[in-house]
Image (cartoon, rainbow, N blue to C red):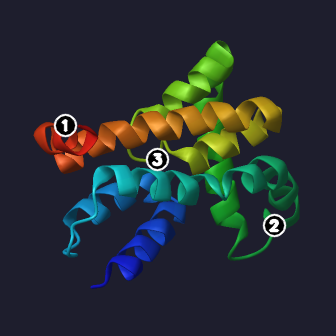
Amino acid sequence: MSRTKAFFLTFLISMLPIVELRGSIPFAAAINTIPRITFIEALPVSIIGNMIPVPFIILLFKYFFKIFRDVKYIGPVFTKVHNKAIKHADKIQKYAYWGLFLFVAIPCPGTGAWTGAVIASVLEMRLRKAFPTILLGVITSGLIMGFISYGLLDLIKTLF
């Protein structure tokens, strides 16, 4: 596979809900390109891809939820996402933006930028504050995934 195609796929994978950056960085580490995609190359591509949907989700989720919650096939999906956000919202609301940062930063299933943006929308957090908070969480998560995917020694070689 060409490096260009690998970068493009890394970017697309990072935009997907559930998978997000937590899947795109291991993909970039595992894909066989010559020369290999380094962590320093994969991280910004993954961060940018992961963050593109965030402002739209923060601004529009509640609006789309109201419209689509009663639609036969789409409604249950929106309701499930909304209920999951409500479930986590209490914990996050207690710690406000620090809670949102930690929720996004810790790379566990279902705790990425997409869910963080839905929670920010449900809690009516301002985009101006929620977006940078989620961005810092995504960067932190990306660094953690880089250590896991590329290995500590490989990461040190890349940085120095």
Give the spatial CA distance, label 3 vs label 1.
Answer: 29 Å
Which quadrant is home to the N terminus?
A: bottom left
Residue shown at 69% from the left, 60% from the top: 78
Tell me which numbered mark, 1 or 2, is placed earlier along the sequence.
2
User: Where in the figure is residue 120, as x and y percent of width and height?
Assistant: 72, 37
Judged from the image, the secondary structure of the residue bearing numbered disc 2 is helix
Circle 2 or circle 3, nearest the eye? 3
Residue shown at 23% from the left, 45% from the top: 158
Residue shown at 68% from the left, 48% from the top: 82
Residue shown at 40% from the left, 79% from the top: 4
- 29 or 92, nearer to the observer: 29
How packed is label 2: few (under 14 Cα within 10 Å), some, or many (20 or more)? some
Which quadrant is home to the C terminus?
A: top left
Residue 68 has which mark?
2
User: Where in the figure is residue 144, as x and y percent of width and height?
Assistant: 32, 37
| Amino acid on which the number 1 mark rests in the picture | Ile
User: Where in the figure is residue 52, as x and y percent of width and height?
Assistant: 65, 58
Q: Which residue lies furthest to the left in this view?
A: 153
The total of numbered circles placed on residues is 3
Q: Mark 3 points at which residue?
A: 110
User: Where in the figure is residue 100, as x and y percent of width and height?
Assistant: 60, 28
Tell me which numbered mark, 3 or 1, is placed earlier along the sequence.
3
Horizontal side of residue 99 vs 61, given as left or right = left
Q: Which residue lies furthest to the front in this view?
A: 160
Q: Mark 1 points at which residue?
A: 156
Kindly check if marks 1 and 2 are in contact, taking CB atoms under 8 A apart as contact. Answer: no
| Amino acid on which the number 2 mark rests in the picture | Phe
| Amino acid on which the number 3 mark rests in the picture | Gly
